[in-house]
Image (tube, coloured by chain):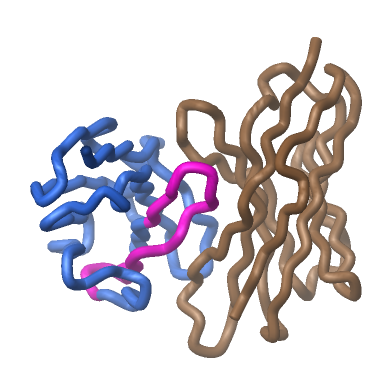
Chain colours: A blue, B brown
Amino acid sequence: EAGVAQSPRYKIIEKRQSVAFWCNPISGHATLYWYQQILGQGPKLLIQFQNNGVVDDSQLPKDRFSAERLKGVDSTLKIQPAKLEDSAVYLCASSLAPFGVQFFGPGTRLTVL
Amino acid sequence: AQKITQTQPGMFVQEKEAVTLDCTYDTSDQSYGLFWYKQPSSGEMIFLIYQGSYDEQNATEGRYSLNFQKARKSANLVISASQLGDSAMYFCAMRAEGGTSYGKLTFGQGTILTVHP
């Protein structure tokens, strides 16, 4: 069974630029999560989707971050414009249902200069 | 609000020995779940073990066991017979499992485990 796929693996941009990350969850997983992991810290949830609807985006900085999950499968996370403090690893995870085990992708390491 | 505390920034263990990684939590929820994930240098979070708050027996998965002490609000991970490949960052996490919760995980700060040959 294929795991959670993410791309790109690495991205370097300058502040005020835009960037987008892509995630393909495990087949059949209805719930999808985006986490931000700053160096030296545990991951923090940014947004959670159930199928193609948002169920929790309370910690998403909505002035610059946006996410969508069209057709309830793939998802994209966008940052526009990026700030220095957005430098982090962005992890995508999926689960069969909201209370299933979450399986994570390899992450995208973003560096904002 | 939920909080996870991992007080050991780093731990060292000799190969083939057992090691315990500490985790304490704070929550007002009656129903919750506790998790341990491993994060190697490659960056991917690997699920290790799960314990539900109403489970009476400690969870075990191969060389991993979770020492769950509900009254003390602790959920320590025990790794038996350590291997060099166990060297990684380990995260304790929890989620509420009822009410208005949607399954969000709250993570601790992590513990770096180094296994010496």
- Decide if residue B37 is on the left or right side of residue A105: right
- Decide if residue B44 is on the left or right side of residue B107: left
x 77%, y 36%: residue: B62
Quadrant position of the C terminus of chain B in the picture: top right
Position of residue B35 measured from the top left corner of the image (x, y, whole percent): 66, 56
Q: Is residue B66 above or below residue B42?
A: below
Residue A46 part of the magenta segment: yes
The magenta stretch spans which residues?
A35-53
B117 and A27: which one is in front? B117
- Decide if residue A5 is on the left or right side of residue A69: right
Position of residue A66 measured from the top left corner of the image (x, y, whole percent): 17, 64
The single residue placed furthest to the left in the displayed view is A17
x 76%, y 21%: residue: B115
x 58%, y 58%: residue: B107
Position of residue A19 measured from the top left corner of the image (x, y, whole percent): 13, 46
The single residue placed furthest to the top in the displayed view is B117
Q: In this view, does A29 lie above or below B30?
A: above
The single residue placed furthest to the bottom in the displayed view is B99
Q: Is residue B109 above or below residue A40?
A: below
Q: How many marks?
A: 0
Residue A69 part of the magenta segment: no
A92 and B88: which one is in front? B88
- Decide if residue B103 is on the left or right side of residue B38: left
Position of residue A59 measured from the top left corner of the image (x, y, whole percent): 36, 72
Q: In this view, does A41 lie above or below A100?
A: above
A76 and A61: which one is in front? A61
x 35%, y 77%: residue: A58
Quadrant position of the N terminus of chain B in the picture: bottom right
